[in-house]
Image (cartoon, rainbow, N blue to C red):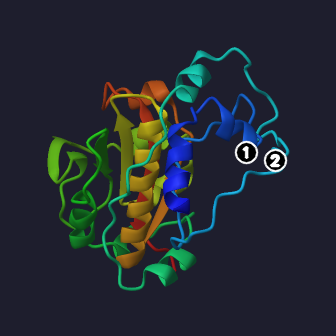
Amino acid sequence: KSVHHFNYTLTKMSPQGNLNSVMGFGVDEVIAAVYGVGEITERQVKALSKPLMQVSPCDYVEGNNPLNRIIRNEPFYTKLPISDRYEHFVQMNTNRRSARAFEPSTMNDATIHALLAIPTSATLDIIAVVLHAQSVQMGIYRKDVCIQSGNFLVECIHLLLNQRFIARANMVILITAEEFSATTHVDAGIYAQELYMACEAHAVGCSGIGAFYDEEAARWSTYPLLYAVAIGGKYE
C-alpha cells in the first residue's frame, strides 16, 4: 500500500514543485530520477515536518538560466537501469576507484572489444577513441566498427583539458546525446556506471571525466558531449 501511495504521490508532483522544495533544493539543483527501494509494507508514507535545509552546491549561480528552466520542467526519470550481471557485484562496486594512471601494455584486445560491445540507451550516441592496443586498429569507433582510422592521442588529451594521464589510456569513451536534457544525463550516468563495473570485471582502470572543451568534441559528433570516460590497463 505504501508503494502505491508513493507512486501516486510522485505522479501528483511536478519536478519544479513540491519534491524539490521538500528536499531543500534551490534554482541550481533539480531531482531528475526517483526510485522507491525497500520491502512492501502496510505502513503509510509520512511527510516531513518541515523542508530540509537548503545547502548551495556551488559558490556562483546564474540566476536567469534558460537551461535550468528547461530541466526543471522535465518529468521524473523512472526507467529501471539495465545492467549486466556480475558475480561479485557488491565487492566490485565497493572497491572500484577512478584511475589516475594507466599502463596500456596490461590491457588486451579482447577487453577493448568487450567494452565496445556494451549496450547503451537509444538516447545516447557513443563514440570510442582507441589510443593504444595490441592489434586493434587505432581510431574512432561506433560500437565495434572503426569509422575513422588514425592516431587521435593529441586531440583527446586537448579535448579533456590537457590532462596528461590520458596519454597512457588505451581508449577514451565519449558519451554524446541528441538532446541535452536531464533524461540523457541520467542515461549517461547509468552507462558510465556500467563501464566502471565492466572495467573492474576485466581488471582494467577507468576514470570518468566531466570537464572538457565542448567545441573540440564537435569534431566527432554533432550532438552535445555529456561525459567522457578514460579506460586503460591498471598501473601497478
Q: Label 2 belongs to which residue?
A: 52
Residue under the image location 65 percent in, 58 percent down = 45
> Based on the displayed image, in which of its 4 quarters is residue 26 positioned?
top right
Distance of mark 1 from mark 2, alpha carbons? 5 Å
Q: Earlier in the sequence, mark 1 or mark 2?
A: 1
Q: Callout 2: helix, strand or loop?
A: loop
Q: Compare residues 85 and 165 and report the one nearer the observer.
A: 85
Q: Label 1 belongs to which residue?
A: 23
Residue under the image location 74 percent in, 42 percent down = 22
Q: Compare residues 160 and 76 and report the one nearer the observer.
A: 76
Q: Callout 1: helix, strand or loop?
A: loop
Callout 1 touching callout 2 (CB < 8 Å) = yes
Image location of residue 111, percent across then percent down: 27, 70
Image location of residue 95, percent across then percent down: 55, 78
* Residue type at numbered disc 1: Met
Q: Compare residues 223 and 63 and report the one nearer the observer.
A: 63
Q: Is 20 drawn above or below residue 131 in the view shown?
A: above
